[in-house]
Image (cartoon, helix red, strand yellow):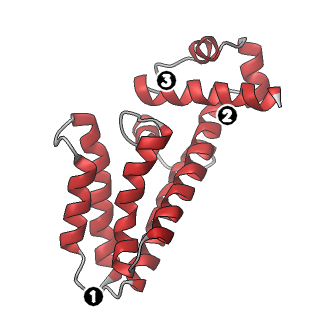
């Protein structure tokens, strides 16, 4: 039990520092100090800085997926199930603690290039693939005439809302994104 608590404390510190201050500028020594553990303990739990980032993203992806699925299940209509993406995002940021923006977009911005054998970038790709495939299913279930076009538009709105969190404008980018998505979706 104590081992899991230590690992969670390390991941909590890494997530807060990586996505508050930046991955590149946050060393494992700083994460270890923030988590109250020795660097050797951190390495025992995650193996390396890349292993630490991978563990943080795996945990974040699982939590986000669960939050989004809960929002989809709670939505009363197929159309609202599409819009649940934005409802889930608001709730996810509320319960999981806010970061500057999106952990996956932040990671991609600091590690440009193809994923290849990079397990960290494979998680970024997995997040994108899950987002696209789930949205496609929801859009089709809502009876949208051209699902590919709608998914592309919703992804731009979603990503734009997340990027707007960095700017601080508009004041409620997630609410604005939901309103835009609501206008984009045909009344089917």
Label 2 Cα neighbours within 10 Å, binned few <14 / some 14-19 / many ≥20? some
Residue at x 38% of width, y 80% of height: 77
Marks 1/3: CA–CA distance: 44 Å
Nearer to us in this view, 68 or 119: 68
Please say if 122 is above or below 78.
above
Query: Residue beneath label 2, please?
Result: 51
Q: Secondary structure at mark 3?
A: helix
Marks 2/3: CA–CA distance: 15 Å
Q: Secondary structure at mark 1?
A: loop
Frontmost of labels 1 and 3 is: 1
Query: Residue beneath label 3, please?
Result: 17
In x, y percent, where is residue 154? 30, 66
Q: Secondary structure at mark 2?
A: helix
In x, y percent, where is residue 175? 24, 53
Residue at x 46% of width, y 78% of height: 137
Q: Which mark is residue 188?
A: 1
Residue 109 vs residue 133: left or right?
left
Label 1 Cα neighbours within 10 Å, binned few <14 / some 14-19 / many ≥20? few
Frontmost of labels 1 and 2 is: 1
């Amino acid at each position: 039990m104590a081992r899991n608590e230590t690992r969670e404390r390390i991941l909590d510190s890494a997530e807060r520092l990586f996505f508050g201050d930046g991955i590149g500028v946050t060393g494992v020594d700083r994460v270890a100090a923030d988590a109250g553990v020795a660097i050797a303990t951190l390495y025992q739990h995650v193996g390396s800085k890349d292993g630490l980032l991978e563990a943080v993203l795996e945990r974040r992806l699982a939590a986000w997926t669960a939050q989004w699925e809960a929002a989809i299940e709670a939505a009363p209509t197929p159309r609202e199930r599409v819009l649940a993406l934005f409802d889930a995002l608001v709730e996810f940021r509320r319960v999981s603690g806010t970061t500057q923006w999106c952990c996956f977009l932040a990671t991609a911005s600091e590690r440009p290039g193809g994923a290849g054998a990079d397990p960290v970038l494979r998680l970024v790709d997995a997040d994108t693939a899950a987002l696209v495939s789930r949205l496609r299913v929801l859009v089709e279930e809502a009876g949208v005439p051209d699902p590919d076009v709608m998914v592309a538009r919703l992804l731009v709105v979603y990503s734009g809302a997340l990027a707007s969190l960095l700017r601080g404008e508009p004041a409620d980018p997630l609410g604005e994104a939901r309103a835009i998505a609501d206008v984009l979706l045909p009344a089917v």
